[in-house]
Amino acid sequence: MTGADTALDGGTATEGRHRISTPASTIGSWLPEGPLGSSLSEGLVRVEAALGAAVGSEHPFVHEAAGHLMSAGGKRFRPMLALLAAQLGDATAPEVVRAAVVCELTHLATLYHDDVMDEAAVRRGAPSANSRWGNSIAILTGDLLFARASDLLADLGPDAVRIQARTYERLVTGQLRETVGPQAGEDPIAHYLEVLADKTGSLVATSARFGASFAGVGQPLVEALTAFGEEVGVAFQLSDDLLDIVSADGTSGKSPGTDLREGVATLPVLFALAGDDPAEERLRALVAGPITEADEHAEALALLRASDALARATEVLREYADRARRRLDGVPEGDVRDALSALCDYVVTRTS
């Protein structure tokens, strides 16, 4: 991987700053100011430079395809959490940035595969790789990014390789369970939340674990931060699902109501389908499958926004955010704990 290791060395952060004028994360106003904010910004610049090197290739098309989603932007939620957890130890340890890049590359790789499975046309406001180049190219590009992540991971030691392997197993298990759906007698809502824990929570948890571990944080605190990552990861995905309904401007990165249009049953829809309120009978009929007609889509979106089902899903989001916050009881008081607590607030308020 030409240049990838060089971009992870401390000496290339300045070079990265010349290319990137602002931190890559667009995650929101919860980010701290002062010395902690400056340290995180510096870390994000190094992560972004390393990501750019990791998707590089001497072959122009491979370089273009591998860098397609990275160039489209993104929240950089996982590397940001790794960098923040590392602030509780030696945040300057070179392994921290490498681990953060591994997590983001893994996430990016899953997006290429997800878009193929979902037949998505747009990702992060740009044409998806599969719509631009076809499914085969998208799948192979995702595989390439997994390979690049594994290459970087090899330098982090066998324990990190094992943790990443188990994380990837959970990612795939979650995708399999989502694809086949709940089994006979299985509660669809419990199934959905378990899928989110595997598909999203697992990698967010590993991001926090890696950041803390490679910064030399003690094991009890590493475990607390890992548990925090899982809970807040599920909360973040739930908030994305709610944004797809409540956002009028596509804040989630998709046009509003994309999940409804594609027949994806997120938590508010599952609550609606499980309900028996006569007042929501029309809503249940509409959301029972994909909605292709524009008038019916607009009607379903309006009904869902005013529904008890949306209110119940929002309450579940708050519960996960509160569970994440309780995981911080063992984190020392200070700027890092305050920032992590602010993240719990942010995942809820971003849907308001």
Image (spheres, helix red, strand yellow):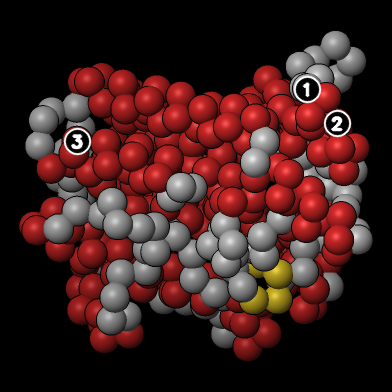
Describe the element under mark 1 as helix, strand or loop: loop
Nearest to the eye among marks 1 and 3: give it: 1
Where residue 348 appears, x then y in whole percent? 42, 40
Q: Quadrant of residue 9?
A: bottom left
Label 1: few (<14), some (14–19) or many (≥20) C-alpha neighbours in 10 Å: few
Q: Given contact means CB atoms under 8 Å apart, are the residues at marks 2 and 3 in contact?
A: no
Task: Point out the frontmost of discs 2 and 3.
Answer: 2
Report helix, strand or loop for mark 3. Answer: helix
In contact (CB < 8 Å): disc 1 and disc 3: no
Task: Name which residue lies at 31% across and 21% down.
Answer: 326
- Residue 32 picture location, percent across and down: 19, 53
Q: From the image, tell me which residue sits under label 2.
A: 281
Work out whether 246 lies above or below 309: below
Task: Give amino acid for label 3.
Answer: Arg
Examine the rendered structure and indicate whether residue 88 appears above or below residue 119.
above
Rendered position, 220 above or below 273: above
Q: Amino acid at mark 2?
A: Glu
Camera-side residue of 249 and 323: 249
Q: Label 2 vs label 1: CA separation?
A: 7 Å
Q: Is residue 344 left or right of residue 221?
A: right
Farthest residue to the front: give it.
Answer: 279
- Marks 2/3: CA–CA distance: 45 Å
* Amino acid type for the residue under numbered disc 1: Asp
- Residue at 15% over, 63% down: 38
- Looking at the image, which residue is at 10% across and 37% down? 334
- Residue farthest top in this picture: 185
For mark 1, what is the residue?
Answer: 277
How far is disc 1 from disc 3 in space, using C-alphas?
Answer: 42 Å
Residue designated by label 3 = 337
